[in-house]
Image: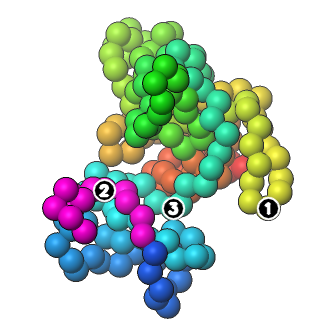
Amino acid sequence: MGKDQANVKGCRFRVSVALPVGAVVNCADNTGAKNLYISSSDLSVAIMGKDQANVKGCRFRVSVALPVGAVVNCADNTGAKNLYIISVKGYHGRLNRLPSAALGDMVMCSVKKGKPELRKKVLNAVIIRQRKSWRRKDGTVIYFEDNAGVIVNPKGEMKGSGIAGPVAKESADLWPKISTHAPAIV
């Protein structure tokens, strides 16, 4: 690893070890990473930094459905009704392509309808439902009847205390703090 690659978070590499999927091991080299997460059966390892401590699980590809400018329902009890997507966190795209979010993505948004103390502020939210269909690894194709998100803080902890409606398994696996408040995980 070169000097410029030492502080890169979220990079992946291959190892051959006898660890179960989902194991988190301490990193003992000088890259600055704190934990290594065994993400799938082919043992690809992801470096987790300090800011990624509340994100759990491996993110499989889900069809992107919500571009910048989309309005989604707010599914928590914070008092917000509609969320307007401003940007998608961690999106690296192409020139002139609108960033789009999918299930489990953290987005920056503003409240279009809701309590006055929530409006006209930039907030973080996580997408928990989408109308665009996607295919799971077991072959099932699934979609929801609406697009919805919940307001979170930058660490991924929910601002509200409850969620209305089901939460996708892909979001619940990535965000354990959201899955604890979910009434149903589909």
Q: Is residue 29 above or below residue 2?
A: below
Q: Amino acid at mark 2?
A: Lys
The N terminus sits in image quarter: bottom left
Q: Left of 95 or right of it: where is 155? A: left
Q: Provide the residue designation for mark 1.
A: 138
Whether residue 3 is in magenta: the answer is yes
Residue 150's x, y, as percent? 50, 33
Quarter of the figure with residue 131:
top right
The CA span between labels 2 and 3 is: 16 Å
Task: Tell me the magenta residue range.
Answer: 1-13
Q: Provide the residue designation for mark 2.
A: 9
The secondary structure that most of the magenta stretch takes on is loop
Quarter of the figure with residue 31:
bottom left
Q: Which residue is drawn at the image coordinates 60% and 41% (left, top)? A: 103
Q: Amino acid at mark 1?
A: Asp
Q: Provide the residue designation for mark 3.
A: 57
Q: Residue furthest bottom?
A: 18
Instruction: Note whether residue 15 is visible.
Output: yes
Q: Secondary structure under badge 3?
A: loop
- Closest to the camera, between mark 1 and mark 2, is 2
Nearer to me, 118 or 83 = 83
Q: Secondary structure under badge 1?
A: loop
Q: Is residue 54 above or below residue 26?
A: above
Whether residue 17 is in magenta: the answer is no
Sequence-earlier tag: 3 or 1:
3
Q: Residues within 10 Å of mark 2 (few under 14, many from 20)?
A: some
Q: Amino acid at mark 3?
A: Gly
Sequence-earlier tag: 2 or 3:
2
Q: Secondary structure under badge 2?
A: loop
Instruction: Note whether residue 78 is visible.
Output: no
Sequence-earlier tag: 1 or 2:
2
